[in-house]
Image (cartoon, helix red, strand yellow):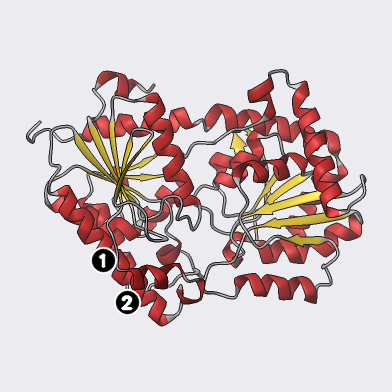
Amino acid sequence: MSKAHRGAPPPRHVVVICHQYPPWSLGGLAEYAERFLHRTRREHPDVRLTLHTMNCPGGLPSREQADGLTIRRPRMPRWLTSRIVSPRNHLAPAGRAAFALALLHFNLATLFALLRVRRRGLVVAVHDWQSAPAGIAAALLRLPVIYHVHNTEATMTPEPDMTDPFGLIKFNQRLLSRLATRVVVPTPEMKQLVGAHGWQTHRVSVIPHGCESLAPTDRTGPDGTTQAARAAARKELLAGSGLGPDARILVFAGRLSPVKGIHTLLRALPEIARRHPRVHLFVLGVGLAGTDQGAAVDRLVAELGLQRRTHLYHRYLPQEELHQHYLAADVGVFPSLYEPFGLVSVEAMSLGTPVVLGPGFSGLIAMDGTEQAALRTATDSPRELADAVCRLLDDPAGAELLAARGREHARQNFPWSAAVNATLSLYADVRAPGGSG
């Protein structure tokens, strides 16, 4: 536990505002919220937790208790919910309008709920721009607000998947960054990025996300069982895919978006295959709903003639199944051009998979002090990516050494307990000094 957390009582009540939460999950934000809240509840049962989230995919209870966590989901009209969850509507004009209306409804309902819970020891934790209006209102009501920034892609990257034509996202982000008591980002690079866009960096704290390690050694003890688990996972994947025992396996997990580097990886694959003819790539993920990103990846695979060595799932996998793919992989490849943190890569590292990262990753992930914990490319070049992957495929002993460093780095520097304690330490410093008790 951090020194600050030992020195100050934790907040009595943390109200979390996060528009995504399982069963509604469009990416890493919902995954982060679920893991953070469950770990906090387990390690700090004295802290009252209330989550405000959207009622998607619809028909969920407006209030429920789950493992000591109070979940509030304001009801929405069914016609609005159906338009939000329909993939074909997500980026269409009507779909965007429906999503904006749903966000407005959610933020207003959350604000009204906050008006009834102004108590001593309260902290309001707002996650990402979708919940910023409620956070802005809470700050204007003089509640202590912590703004957790998980992604600035829409306003701070050259070619975002989601644009901000009217500047509303940027306006809400900047206003909340000024009104919030503190701002939290997951890496030093993101702190530099928001500073370059005019945010007050002296009010920005860096707290890395945690890593959910489900490695076999955590369950069965001796390190030798890791190799047995990797062999079992590899055998099962090869058999299910009809591949021979000499196949070399690459695994990519993430959104099928150019910003995640999937197109770069596919363009690098012919060179990798020239040098390692038995290589096969497993692509675990989907395109952004409402776009043709998935179809564009299919077209590129066909154009490059990679159908026989590329395994496209077009779906996100349950966590345990995803981890089995990491265990089976010779190399995990995450070539993002922009990556706020990269939970998938850190979890692959924690399982002992040698990893190649793209130029968008933080040095916090790639380096353990002065030692490499993962290979990281400097550019978005397919040739550079192919060289990095082949460097590991060419040298199994070197790959094993990198994997061991990466595994230790992930487990020692990104445990969920550290993320939870650092966050609660910050909350303890800014908790509401007044109120009704």
Q: Is residue 23 left or right of residue 292?
A: left
Kind of residue at badge 2: Phe
Q: Which residue is mark 1?
A: 104
> Residue at 33% across / 25% down in the picture?
45
Foreground mark, 2 or 1, reads 1
Give coordinates of residue 243: x percent, y percent: 89, 52
Which mark, residue 285?
none
**Which badge, 2 or 1, comes first in the chain's sequence?**
1
Q: Quadrant of residue 221?
A: top right
> Among all residues in the image, which is located at the extreme bottom?
93
Q: Is residue 423 above or below residue 170?
A: above
Kind of residue at badge 1: Leu
Q: Is residue 366 visible?
A: no
Give coordinates of residue 431: x percent, y percent: 20, 34
Q: Which residue is mark 2?
A: 166
Q: Is residue 63 left or right of residue 158?
A: left
> Residue at 55% across / 35% down in the picture?
212
Give coordinates of residue 137: x percent, y percent: 17, 56
Circle 1 packing at 10 Å, graded few (<14), some (14-19), many (20+), is some
Q: Is residue 396 left or right of residue 68?
A: right
Mark 2 and mark 1: span between their CA atoms?
A: 16 Å
Q: Secondary structure at mark 1?
A: helix
Q: Is the Cβ of the residue at disc 2 closer than 8 Å to that at disc 1?
A: no
Q: Is residue 142 visible?
A: yes
- Number of callouts: 2
Q: Is residue 294 above or below residue 122?
A: below
The front one of 200 and 75 is 75
Give coordinates of residue 149: x percent, y percent: 38, 51
> Residue at 68% across / 70% down in the picture?
297
Q: Quadrant of residue 302?
A: bottom right
